[in-house]
Image: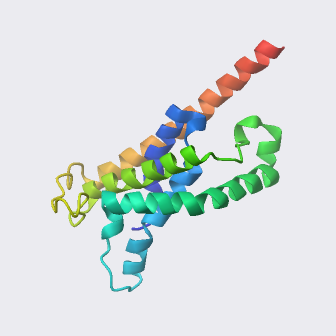
Amino acid sequence: MPVTPFHVGPGSLVKVLLREKFSLTIFAFAQIVIDLQPLAAMLGADIEVHGFTHTYLGATLVGAISGIFGKPLCEQGLRLWNRDMSLSKSHPLWHFPEKISWLIVISSALIGTYSHVLLDCIMHAEIQPFYPLAAENALFGLVEMDELHKLCAYAGLAGFICYFGIGYLLSVTANRQRG
């Protein structure tokens, strides 16, 4: 199924590790863009389901395109979130920076597309991640699909709990130091 939320789970763990040096919104945007080819194929386009976009060469191109188009869209989305969400006004944990540097945009988009290809290699035999250099997919079946979905979901849950938990502890510590 294209545009699955499972791919965002591991990205939330990256967000915990890198915090302000990683954009989960750009990462998620890249997840959507890379799956436009499979979506088009499933809607009847005469193209491969997992073709060029699901190679590391294609993922590099998709990552760059995702960064270029995702930066203004994600920054606008963050501005709207911060303006409209009552939680972001009442608690700084729900308020997110609205500007994303180009370095963070490109790195987050590439982490998104490369991790997407990696996870899909485990699930889909027809993916050729190193095309045109090699045709084989050595990762297919490494983990059962149900287990992979669970791992991604658990990663997402753990990532969000850790991100907001650490953020809460940092804000409490900062308030104590000020007070």
Q: Please count the marks in the image.
A: 0
Among the 4 quarters of the image, the one containing residue 121: bottom left
Residue 58 in the figure: left or right of residue 70: left
Q: Is residue 144 above or below residue 32?
A: above
Residue at x 16% of width, y 59% of height: 134
**x%, y% of residue 46?**
33, 86
Among the 4 quarters of the image, the one containing residue 22: top right
Q: Nearer the viewer, residue 43 or 22?
A: 22
Residue 173 in the figure: left or right of residue 102: right
Q: Is residue 116 above or below residue 20?
A: below
Q: Is residue 153 above or below residue 71?
A: above
**x%, y% of residue 53?**
36, 66
Among the 4 quarters of the image, the one containing residue 60: bottom left
Residue at x 49% of width, y 46% of height: 107
Q: How is colour applied across the structure in the image? A: rainbow
Residue at x 44% of width, y 62% of height: 62
Q: Quadrant of the N terminus?
A: bottom left
**x%, y% of residue 68?**
56, 60
Q: Quadrant of the C terminus?
A: top right
Residue 89 in the figure: left or right of residue 65: right
User: Can the viewer see residue 3 in this picture?
Assistant: no
Residue at x 42% of width, y 79% of height: 40
**x%, y% of residue 49?**
32, 74
Q: Nearer the viewer, residue 26 or 163?
A: 26
Q: Nearer the viewer, residue 59 or 15?
A: 59
User: Can the viewer see residue 14 in this picture?
Assistant: yes
